[in-house]
Each structure stands twice: as C-alpha cells, then as structure tokens.
Amino acid sequence: MIDLQVQQQFGRIGLKITPFQYDLTTHPADLEIQQRPAEITLEQPAATLEIDYTPARESLGFCGIVAQERVFNQDAKATCDAGISRRVFEGEQFANISKKVSVARIVTQMAESRQKELQLVSTQPIRISVTNHPVDWNVNTGGVSVNSTLGSVHGEFQSGSVHSFMEQNPYIQFHAVGSIIDGLK
C-alpha cells in the first residue's frame, strides 16, 4: 500500500517596522511683573513760637536792667522835684511872716499823711508771635514694569516606515511512502 504524505509550509511575511518619532520641546512663557509703590516724602520744619513777657512784666513793675534803670531815673527825678517843691513851699511859708505861721505848724503840716491815689491801669499784653514754615513735599510716582519672554514650541517629526519581506516561502510537497505491492500473506 502506498501512502501519500503531504507536507505543507505556509508562507510567512516578515515586517520591518520603524516607528515614527515625534519629539516636542516646549519652553514656557515667562511673565514677570514688578510694581513699585509711590513714595511721598513730607518735610515741615517746626513752627517758631516766640513769647515776649517783657512789656507785661514791666507794666507790673518787674523790669529788666535797662527798664529798671529807666524807672529808677524817673522815680529819682520825681522825688527830687517833690523835694524841691516841698522846700520851696516851706521857704515861702517861712518867708511870709505876715501870716504869722509858727515853725511847728509848718513842720506838722508837711508831716501830715496825704491822701493816697489809686489808679487803675491796664497792663501791656504778652507779645506772642508764630512763624509757620511751609510743607516741602516730594512725590515719586510708582509704576509697573513688565518683563516677558515668549514661550516656544519646537517639534521634530521623523516618519515611520513599514517594509515587508518574505520571511518563509510557502510550499507543498507530496511523497509517496510504502510499496505498491502488498505483501503476501
């Protein structure tokens, strides 16, 4: 008996695949904002206050050296004038003998207390003066400064490829196996 043997091999296709490559490089944008505040500087020298008590003190009798000297001179003149007037009055009284006034009477007349005079006077006001100084000011306006760098996107693309080839060829083989003659039995 003859057997038929069939051997078969399928064809195989091989693929050489080169994948695509896509490189993407990005640089982000940079935005920098700086704000400078406004600056205000103010300068004002202190006001000058002058208080002069001199006229008020002098009117109350508390004088400085120069004013006290003036007051002493006036008092001395007034006392001198009063003394001279009194001596003249006494001399006239003694000279007038016709009135027959005694010396004792003239002396007692001059020694009698006199009426005091009271005067109401106003005192000088205190002098006050104020000197104001103007305000010096300076303004530096603030602002906003912006520094920006644009971002970028860079891409590289390499296309892929597919190559096919026959990795294994197909075939069919037939073989006859065995003998044509059947063995005798």
Image: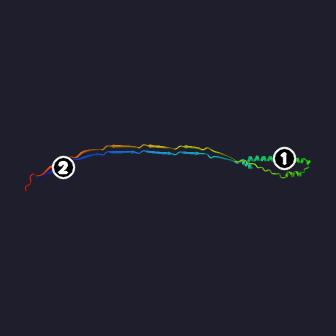
Q: Residue at x 80, y 47 (%)?
A: 78
Mark 1 vs 2, N-terminal side? 2
What residue does disc 2 label? 8
Mark 1, secondary structure of its residue:
helix
Circle nearer the viewer, 1 or 2: 2
Q: Seen in the image, is 54 located left or right of residue 14?
A: right
Characterize the local packing of mark 1: few (<14), some (14-19) or many (20 or more) Cα atoms within 10 angstroms. Answer: few
How is this picture coloured?
rainbow
Mark 2, secondary structure of its residue:
strand
Q: Name the kind of residue labelled 1 in the image.
A: Ser
Q: Residue at x 74, y 47 (%)?
A: 67
Q: Where the C terminus falls, by quadrant? A: bottom left
- Name the disc covering residue 85, or none: 1
- Name the disc covering residue 181, or none: none
Q: Residue at x 86, y 47 (%)?
A: 89
Residue, far bottom: 185
Residue 30 in percent (x, y) is at 43, 45
Residue, far left: 184
Characterize the local packing of mark 2: few (<14), some (14-19) or many (20 or more) Cα atoms within 10 angstroms. Answer: few
37, 87: nearer the viewer? 37
Q: Name the kind of residue labelled 2 in the image.
A: Gln
Q: Pointer 1 and pointer 2: residues touching (CB < 8 Å)?
A: no
Residue, far front: 120
Residue 181 in percent (x, y) is at 8, 52
The number of numbered discs placed on residues in the rendered structure image is 2
Residue 164 in percent (x, y) is at 25, 45
Separation of marks 1 and 2 at Cα, in angstroms: 176 Å
Q: Residue at x 88, y 52 (%)?
A: 105
